[in-house]
Amino acid sequence: MESLKYHRILLKLSGEALGGDVGSGIDPKRALDIASRVKDVREMGVDVAIVIGAGNLWRGKVGLTSGMDRATADYMGMLATVMNGLALMDALESLGVMTRVQSAIEMRSVAEPYIRRRAIRHLEKGRVVIFGGGTGNPYFSTDTAAALRAMEIDADVLIKATKVDGVYDSDPVKNPKAVKFDQLTYIDTINRRLEVMDSTAITLCMENKLPILVLNLWDAKALHDVLVGKKAGTLVTA
Ligand code: UDP
C-alpha cells in the first residue's frame, strides 16, 4: 500500500454533483460515479466522511427571493441534504462500501442521529460516514457544516470537490486567461473574495488550522495524487 499523506478526510460535495448534466434533481448514475471515486479512496485505506449540500434540490436563498421565512427555507435545504445523503449511501452500498448516514436533524427511521463518537467509531471500522442535515441550524451552509464536522472527527484535511481543478483568480469557465493558484492562505481567500468556501467556513478552518484542498471531483488521478502527498488542485493553509 502507498504511504498516505492524509489518513482521514472530510469530503465536501455540492448537491450539484448529484444533479446530472443540468445540476438539478438526483441522477442515480451520477451518484454511482461519485460512489466509485469514494470507493477508490477507501481502498487506499483512507477514512472517508462526507458532507453533501443540496443545491440540486433546494437552497434557502431561493425561498428568500419569493418572500419565504429564512429559517423555514433553510430547514428545507437541510432536509434536502438528507435525501442526497441517502442517494449516495445507496450508491456506495451497491458497490459494497459500508456506509452510515447521520443527520443533524433527528429522523431516526431514515438516518442515525449525529453522534460524534459514534461517527468516529464507524470511521475506525472502515465505514464511510455521510453527514446530512448540515449543521442543523438555519443561516449556515453545508460548507460550514463540512468545516465543523472535519474538526469534530479530527480529519487531516477538508477536500472541497468542485467542477474545476482548483481555485482561480477569476471564473475559468468565463475567462480563458484565468490563473490557477497552487497554494493560498486562508486570509488571501477571504480578502480576495475567492470562491473557495463561504467566509464562515474558511474562518473556522483558519482558527483551527485545518487545511483545505480544492480539487476536481471527476479527476480520479488528482484525488489519488493529493492523498499520497503529490501536488494537485489548490491547497489553502495558514
Ligand atoms: N443549510 C442550512 N444550514 C446548514 C446547512 C445548509 O440552513 O447548516 C441550508 C441552506 O438553506 C442551504 C441549503 O441548506 O442553502 C443547501 O445547502 P448548500 O447551499 O450549502 O448546498 P450546496 O451549495 O453545497 O449544494
Image: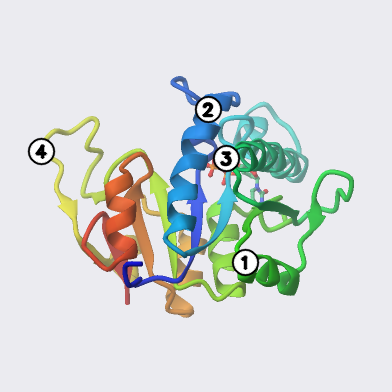
Residue at numbered disc 2:
19
Residue at numbered disc 3:
95
Tell me which numbered mark, 1 or 3, is placed earlier along the sequence. 3
Q: Residues within 10 Å of mark 4 (few under 14, many from 20)?
A: few
The reply to whether the residue tagged 1 has its Cβ within 8 angstroms of ligand 1 is no
Q: Secondary structure at mark 4?
A: loop
Residue at numbered disc 1:
123
Near-viewer residue (141 or 115): 115
In the picture provided, is 179 more to the left or to the right than 140?
Answer: left
Q: Secondary structure at mark 3?
A: loop
Q: Are marks 3 and 2 in contact (CB under 8 Å)?
A: no
Near-viewer residue (89 or 13): 89
Q: Nearer the viewer, mark 4 or mark 1?
A: 1
Spatial CA distance of label 4 from label 1 is: 42 Å
Spatial CA distance of label 4 from label 3 is: 40 Å
Position in image of residue 5 (x %, y %): 34, 72
Tell me which numbered mark, 3 or 2, is placed earlier along the sequence. 2
Q: Amino acid at mark 1?
A: Leu
Q: Residues within 10 Å of mark 3 (few under 14, many from 20)?
A: few
Q: Residue at x 47, y 34 (%)?
A: 33
Tell me which numbered mark, 2 or 1, is placed earlier along the sequence. 2
* Label number found at residue 177: 4
Q: Nearer the viewer, mark 4 or mark 3?
A: 3
Position in image of residue 112 (x %, y %): 81, 55
